[in-house]
Image: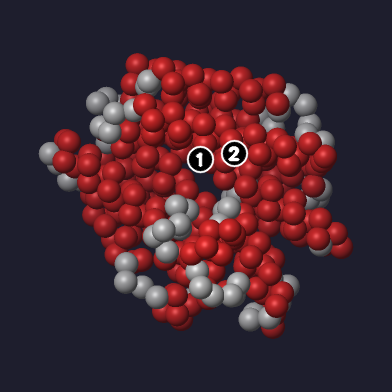
């Protein structure tokens, strides 16, 4: 496969995953802002920080008003990570690799772009926001369903899935790290009821609240929730699940191309950091320090994949 085609597939699904993650993040911020009306601006600032867009946002805005933040993350054409921008990028990449996609996958991506172009044409009113965010999540699921249901399990499929899980892993790590420290009012609250409520909020932001109830025989507390989001391989958005999927898809590529690359070693190293760990050792290492290193390692892995498979050639 041409590197440019591999890159188009990879970035198409990274972009679609980013759109969904942004919608989830806005939804979590919206929910918390409603319950913390006396400090809503701090919450919306944490949403921007989690999306790694603080510098770009502050170049355009002086305050963290809810309407401005939502508009910036959903519709702002000048923001390369807004839902509008990343879905446009996904559709552009899909058009570039059209011959590598089934009709169902191409149609799902193209219809998503046309729907969002209309949906995000005007600023989203607060009363319409939950419905718009639900539509973004549903369209992302629609494209994934088309991929799973119609594509051959070959190198095309592997590059799509690697893009999805690189993006998902980065997002989950950022949400746990930035959201938790932004939400907790002071270190003295650690272990308190408020602390546990904040961890529940993080669960909801990755749609894992109900899954936690089903899968974990424990109360909503920091240790149990952090363990679930970081180490539980049953959860499709946990760090351990994402690393396992990245390694699996890269291994398929190594087999298909009969060659191992430096990115395979990086992926194995990332998985080793999470394998056979317990949450107590991660807390002892320092949750923030651990997550920061995971975010950096994930970025390095993504860059190495681009280099090894010559996405720019």
Q: Total label count? A: 2
Residue 184, horizontal then vertical, whole percent? 69, 71
Residue at far left of view: 258
Name the residue located 37 percent from the left edge and 20 percent from the top edge: 102
Closer to the N terminus: mark 2 or mark 1?
Answer: 1
Name the residue rendered at 58%, 53% in the picture: 207
The alpha-carbon separation of the residues under discs 2 and 1 comes to: 9 Å
- The residue that disc 2 covers is 137
Q: Is residue 104 visible?
A: yes
Which residue appears at 46% of the width and 34% of the height? 144
Taking the image as shown, residue 88 lies to the left or right of residue 14, namely right
Where's the C terminus, which quadrant?
A: top left
Q: Viewed as shown, does residue 297 lie left or right of 114?
A: left
x and y percentages locating residue 61 in the rendered image: 77, 44
Image quarter of residue 178: bottom right
Few, some or many residues within 10 Å of mark 2 (<14, 14–19, 20+): some
Residue 163 figure quarter: top left
Camera-nearest residue between 56 and 161: 161
Compared with 23, 10 (above or below) is above
How far across and down, in percent of the image, does residue 271 sit? 32, 60
**Residue 273 to residue 54: above or below:** below
Residue 40 place in picture, x, y as percent:
81, 57
Which numbered marker is on residue 17? 1
Residue at disc 2, secondary structure: helix
Q: Residue at x 33, y 60 (%)?
A: 270
Does dot 1 land on a helix, a strand or a loop? helix
Q: In this orientation, does residue 295 appear? A: no
């Amino acid at each position: 496969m041409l590197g440019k085609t591999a890159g188009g597939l990879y970035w198409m699904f990274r972009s679609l995953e980013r759109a969904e993650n942004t919608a989830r993040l806005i939804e979590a911020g919206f929910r918390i802002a409603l319950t913390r009306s006396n400090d809503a601006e701090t919450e919306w600032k944490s949403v921007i920080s989690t999306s790694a867009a603080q510098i770009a946002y502050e170049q355009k805005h002086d305050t963290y008003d809810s309407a401005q933040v939502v508009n910036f993350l959903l519709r702002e054409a000048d923001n390369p990570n807004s839902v509008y921008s990343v879905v446009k990028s996904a559709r552009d990449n899909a058009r570039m690799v059209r011959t590598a996609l089934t009709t169902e996958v191409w149609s799902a991506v193209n219809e998503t772009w046309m729907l969002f172009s209309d949906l995000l044409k005007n600023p989203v009113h607060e009363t319409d926001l939950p419905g718009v965010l639900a539509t973004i999540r549903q369209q992302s699921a629609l494209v994934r369903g088309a991929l799973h249901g119609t594509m051959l399990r070959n190198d095309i499929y592997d590059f799509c899935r690697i893009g999805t899980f690189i993006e998902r892993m980065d997002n989950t790590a950022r949400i746990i790290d930035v959201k938790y420290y932004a939400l907790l009012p002071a270190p003295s609250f650690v272990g308190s009821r408020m602390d546990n409520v904040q961890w529940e909020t993080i669960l909801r932001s990755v749609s894992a609240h109900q899954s936690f109830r089903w899968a974990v025989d424990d109360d909503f507390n920091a240790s149990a929730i952090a363990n679930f989001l970081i180490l539980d391989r049953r959860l499709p958005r946990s760090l351990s699940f994402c690393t396992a999927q990245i390694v699996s898809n890269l291994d398929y590529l190594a087999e298909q191309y009969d060659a191992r690359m430096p990115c395979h070693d990086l992926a194995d190293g990332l998985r080793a950091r999470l394998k056979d760990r317990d949450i107590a050792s991660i807390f002892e290492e320092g949750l923030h320090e651990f997550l920061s290193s995971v975010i950096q390692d994930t970025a390095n892995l993504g860059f190495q994949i681009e280099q090894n498979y010559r996405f720019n050639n």
